[in-house]
Image (cartoon, helix red, strand yellow):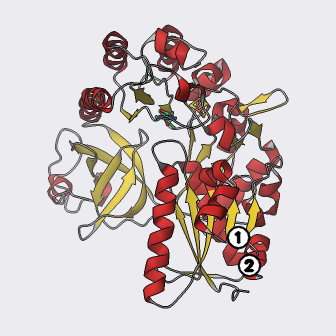
Amino acid sequence: MNAPPKTFHVKSFGCQMNVYDGDRMAELMAADGLAPADADVADLVILNTCHIRERATEKVYSDIGRIRKVAGKQGRVPMIAVAGCVAQAEGQEIVARARVDVVVGPQAYHNLPELVAKAAGGTAALDTDMPALSKFARLPARRRVPPSAFLTVQEGCDKFCTYCVVPYTRGSEISRPFAAIVDEARALVDAGAREITLLGQNVNAWAQGDLGLHDLIRALDRVPGLARIRYTTSHPNDMTQGLIDAHGDVASLMPFLHLPIQSGSDRILKAMNRSHGRDSYLRVLDRVRAVRPDIALSGDFIVGFPGETEADFADTLSLVDAIGYAQAFSFKYSQRPGTPAATMTDQLPAHVMDERLQRLQAALNRDQQAFNRATLGRTCTILVERRGKLPGQMLGKSPWLQSVHVIGDHAIGDLIAVDLIRADPNSMAGSVPIPVAACAPPGPLDVAGHSNEARASIGPFAD
Ligand code: 5AD
Ligand code: SF4
């Protein structure tokens, strides 16, 4: 028998879906009467884990050890729950190896309060069932969310890329119902959201009958108070013409597309079972750019997939050169237990992967800086999300998902027009144009129509 926990802490690793799930777990525990606390003092620590790369499992075990050590020094024994994809993949093994109190998979965390109660009764509680979507109906309403909020609309994946654990840990593709999503979007706006990012492992595979993601986006575009819509992550084969068209004419849909390809080599794409080629990917991007020329493109890359030759890798570099991504993520291939690629014979040595990753990241950084420079001088709207480190400095996101610093009296959640005046390696500096009517006495204006005073108010930017 343990005392029922009075305080909790959720620590999330990995993707934005996990951030969303972690927030919802926190809301669930708060609704159950527990108070949030720091990890080092909480009675219950929920580790919301990621299994996609590296030795994520080992990270969980070392975290558990660290939490117990800190608590031990204080004479406490916290309850530990392992949630997320490692919980789904390892299940009973975690209970056996680390004697944790609760193991709960990504489709079952709505049962956390009962599992915690069972564990408080002295029995380790495990739930890795994958019931179709029942969890969303059981989660409490959201009361307070940041201006930029996540909304999971789709889960799971049926694509079975040969390197990836997601189809095993998150299950097959499931779309949440249209009406439930629109209701949740309205509730998020009431709770403070001005921007919503629709989430799914294959978000553009969202479907309900004849409806596709673009229909959902068009419905959300009509939700009063919702200024911006984004979605991630997409698969090239699910980029329908309807979705591409939405980029052309839905004003609240931001000009940003995260569309992973993983490799520029057709041979490797085939071995990865990506079910699309290099050219078909490039053609999709051409079609998106045709309707939205300023779209910022993003992607994911894996270097060092089994059998990747220098020529294959050169194809990846030439694809990157041809596209000019605004930003992109790149990873060393990681052998995941249970995936087909893990047993392929021609695994590459670590030093080859390291060296290729460096070259790829140099190219991606170059392109990110070129993209940022290309937006210099543009006026755009930013959504203010938080304070910066300097006095009076605020940080927001441009439509192209750049971080933008401004100095000024702005509130979190404000949408403000800024001129992009400086491109730093990972962010932009913006200045707020002073409306002509607000300048008294009327002074000389520069060619762009903005007073020099406004520009002089820009401080040093650092965050
Ligand atoms: N090794 C390296 N990267 C991987 N990803 C998925 N599985 C692996 C793996 N086994 C990357 C892909 C995917 C992103 C979410 O993680 O690039 O798009
Ligand atoms: Fe993994 Fe491929 Fe599915 Fe993406 S599309 S989640 S990489 S299996």
Residue 111 coordinates in the image, percent (x, y): 78, 65
Q: Nearer the viewer, residue 338 or 35?
A: 338
Quadrant of the frame with the N terminus: bottom right
Q: Real-space Cα distance between discs 2 and 1?
A: 6 Å
Binning the other alpha carbons within 10 Å of mark 1 as few (below 14), some (14 to 19) or many (20 upward) gives: many
Residue 233 coordinates in the image, percent (x, y): 56, 36
Residue 438 drawn above or below residue 306: below
Q: Which mark is residue 423?
A: none
Q: Are marks 2 and 1 in contact (CB under 8 Å)?
A: yes
Residue 107 coordinates in the image, percent (x, y): 74, 52
Does mark 1 have its CB less than 8 Å from ligand 2? Answer: no
Which structural element holds mark 1?
helix
**Residue type marked 2:** Asp
Residue occupying image coordinates x 49% and y 50%: 56
Q: Is residue 425 visible?
A: yes
Residue occupying image coordinates x 45% and y 60%: 414
Residue occupying image coordinates x 57% and y 22%: 236
Residue occupying image coordinates x 19% and y 52%: 451
Which structural element holds mark 2?
loop
Q: Nearer the viewer, residue 282 or 407?
A: 282
Residue at the disc numbered 2: 32
Q: Which mark is residue 28?
A: 1
Quadrant in the rendering for residue 398: top left
**Residue type marked 1:** Leu
